[in-house]
Image (cartoon, rainbow, N blue to C red):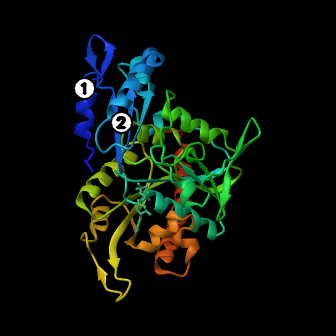
Amino acid sequence: MAEVTKEKILKILKGIDSGTAGMDVVARNWVNDIVIKNGHVAFTLEVPTEMGPKLEPVRAMAEKAVYNLPGVISVTVVLTAERKAAAASQPQAPAQSGSGRDRLDLPGIKHIVAVASGKGGVGKSTTAANLAVALASQEKRVALFDADIFGPSMPRMLGLSGQKPHSDGTKVYPLENHGVKVMSIGFMVAEDNPVIWRGPMVMGALEQMLKDVAWGDLDVMVVDMPPGTGDTQLTMSQRVPLSGAVIVSTPQDIALLDARKGLNMFRKVEVPILGMIENMSHYICPSCGHRDNIFGSGGAKKMAQELDADFLGDIPLDLKIRETSDSGNPIVIADPESPHAKAYLSIAERVFEKLEDGATKAAPNISMGT
Ligand code: ADP
């Protein structure tokens, strides 16, 4: 199958007129956050606020053009106006830091931890699912918020596919399995058809999901972030009151470079980095038990050291991890005594300790009113 690349997408989008002074959408600098995952493509068109509603036909044309590229299975194009709106109203304002932006008020939730990656396909969702289930098995009150709107996989990974959360007209009640409350846009759309948002801003929709859900009292909410470090991720890290972030990466250099971007993004918005996890770090032969570092190993550990972040652990590449999470029973549940489950459980313990530690340390800062 033909490979879908950013370059091919941008090339075809150069043919889409923005409807303003004969410039195309790429020349206007509207195209952002391109995510490509197994033939599924998603990106945002960041347009001036006042033009938003008029640009639905342009959005639809862009979607169709990319859909027609060989190798593309589905396309999600989102119109967003948020960043431009802020820039237009404060043209002289300095770059915003995390502390300068209002955070959502989510009372009753003690810690919110983002699980993030610099790019898609590194096992971020698998890690988020296992981490959430591990925390629940350690007697914590846990929710998993699937913010990966470009590829919501939590309904499948938590064994809740095809189910719909109940709503009483005011609040939506999260579904629950393996001791974890789950909310995902995947409950509203089919996973193989991620054509989700037609018009509304991504962040607006995510905020609504966060606020409208009756989460109850929680010790930890694990957020499966959208992959990458674009504006959606940045806004999300600024608006959601994150206590910390965990960065997942694979040993390949490229992924590590991306992970570095992820780490820097959270630092920029003053979200503490709880640490890095190296996923698919090595392969253990199921018949002889031999360990093979197929991609080279230890990259994340080294990078964590270089960047002064904690290394939380490595998870091997193992068919069982894929099979269990893809069938709705993450390995922490399916085989809690296995070394892989133990690795997740020990990471979860560390993460929770760090969250509690951070909460105690953060207190003086708040009282200083900075
Ligand atoms: P991301 O959220 O980063 O896009 P996923 O968690 O969806 O990545 O993982 C992509 C695929 O890789 C899934 O099919 C998942 O089951 C598989 N996978 C993730 N981690 C592992 C692992 N350690 N060993 C084997 N397969 C894995």
Badge number at residue 51: none
The reply to whether discs 1 and 2 touch (Cβ–Cβ < 8 Å) is no
267 to 279, vertically: above or below: above
Task: Give the answer, above or below, for where 14 lies relative to 140.
Answer: above
Which label was assigned to residue 67?
2
Q: Is residue 171 visible?
A: yes
Going from the N terminus, do you reach mark 1 or mark 2 first? 1
Q: Give SS at disc 1.
A: loop
Q: Name the residue carrying label 1.
A: 14
Query: Could you tell me residue 194's position as x and y percent?
Result: 48, 42
The quadrant in which residue 105 appears is: top right
Farthest residue in the top direction?
21
State the residue at coordinates (60%, 47%): 187
Decide which of 147, 289 is in the foreground and name it.
Answer: 289
Instruction: Pick whichever, 129 or 231, lies toward us.
Output: 129
Q: Quadrant of residue 93?
A: top left
Residue 227 or residue 364, whichever sits in front: 227
In the picture, measured across the screen, residue 301 lies left or right of residue 85, that is left
Mark 1–mark 2 distance (CA, rounded to whole Å): 15 Å
Sort mark 1 into few (<14), some (14-19) or many (20+) by Cα contacts within 10 Å: some
Decide if ligand 1 comes within 8 Å of the CB at mark 1: no
Q: Position of residue 84 (x, y in %)?
A: 39, 23
Q: Quadrant of ligand 1?
A: bottom left
In the drawing, does residue 310 fall left or right of residue 209? left
* Camera sees residue 105: no
Task: Tell me the element at label 2.
Answer: helix
The kind of residue on which mark 2 rests is Tyr
